Image (tube, helix red, strand yellow):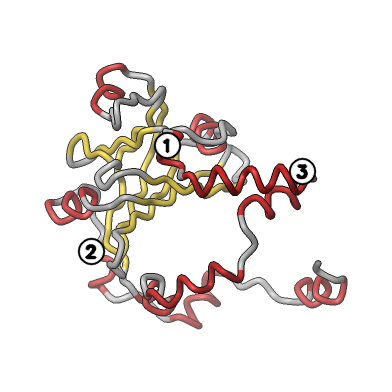
Amino acid sequence: MTDRTSLLAVDDMRALDLAQIRSALGEATPAAYAKITDHLDENCLRFLAHSPFCCLSTSDASGACDCSPRGDYPGFVRPLDSRTIAIPDRLGNKLADSMQNIVSNGHVGLLCFVPGMSETLRINGSAFITDDPGLLSMLEQDHSIPDLAIVVRTEQVYLHCGRALLRAGLWDPEMQDLAAEVPHAGQIWASTSGLDEQVGELIDQNVRLGYRELY
C-alpha cells in the first residue's frame, strides 16, 4: 500500500516541459527519424508473419488510456495490404475496453513481438471495428471465425531497437524462474475482486488446462 509520505514526495516533483526533456536527452539522430515509414515493407511483413503476440494501446475521447495484450498463432496480425492490417477479436473477458476506445478515438498503437528477437515492430495508425463477413472468414483459426475484427490503417511503422528487451533479459530462460515468486492468476483475481479462494483455485485449474482449448 502506498503511504502518504511517498505521495507527498511525488507531489513535490517537478513536471518537465518538452524543452527541458530535450535538454536532458538531446536530439534524435537523422537515422532514427529516417527509419519511420507509413507502410509495411517486405521486412515488416515477414516480421508480422512470425509474430504471435502484440500489445494494443488505445485511449478514449477524454484521453484515458488502455493497453491490451493480443496473441494467437504467428501471423494473426494479418496484413491486408501495405497500409492496412487486421486483428481478429478472439475469446476474452468481454469488457471490450479497446473497442470502446476505438469507437470514440480511433488512434491506436501496436507493439509486436517475435519470441527470441530483441527488436519489436511498432505500428501507429487509425482503427475501426468491423463485422465484415469476408474479412472474418479470412481470419478463421482452428475452425473458429471471430465475431469482430479491428482494422488498422498504418500511419507510422518502424522497428524499435532491442535495448529494453535486452536489459530485461525477457527471452533468457532463467528469467522464467521469476514466475514462481508471483501469485497465481486465481490468487490475484480472488484478492482484487473479493472472490472466495476456492473460486480462485478453479480459475487456476482452467489456466493450467490452457486457454487454447477455450478458443
Q: Nearer the viewer, residue 195 or 97?
A: 195
Q: N-terminal of the two: label 2 or label 3?
A: 2
**Secondary element at image label 3:** loop
Q: Give the vertical position of 10 relative to 44 (above or below).
A: below
**Secondary element at image label 1:** helix
Q: Give the vertical position of 159 relative to 57 (above or below).
A: below
The type of residue carrying mark 2 is Lys
Mark number displayed over residue 167: none
Which class describes the residues within 10 Å of circle 2: few (<14), some (14-19), or many (20+)? few
* Residue at the disc numbered 1: 213
For the residues labelled 1 and 2, the Cα–Cα distance comes to 40 Å
Q: Position of residue 114 (x, y in %)?
A: 29, 59
The type of residue carrying mark 3 is Leu
Instruction: Spot the residue most to the left.
Output: 42
* Residue at the disc numbered 3: 195
Q: Position of residue 176 (x, y in %)?
A: 46, 70
For the residues labelled 3 and 1, the Cα–Cα distance comes to 24 Å
* Residue at the disc numbered 2: 35
Q: Nearer the viewer, residue 73 or 135?
A: 73
Q: Give the vertical position of 88 relative to 177 (above or below).
A: above
Quadrant for the N terminus, please: bottom right
For the residues labelled 2 and 3, the Cα–Cα distance comes to 48 Å
Instruction: Spot the residue most to the right.
Output: 4
In front of the other: label 1 or label 2? 1
Q: Position of residue 62 (x, y in %)?
A: 62, 41
The type of residue carrying mark 1 is Glu
Check if mark 3's residue and mark 1's residue have beta carbons within 8 Å. Answer: no
Residue depicted at x 28% and y 70%? 32
**Secondary element at image label 2:** loop
Q: Position of residue 23 (x, y in %)?
A: 49, 81
* In this rendering, position of residue 43 left or right of residue 190: left
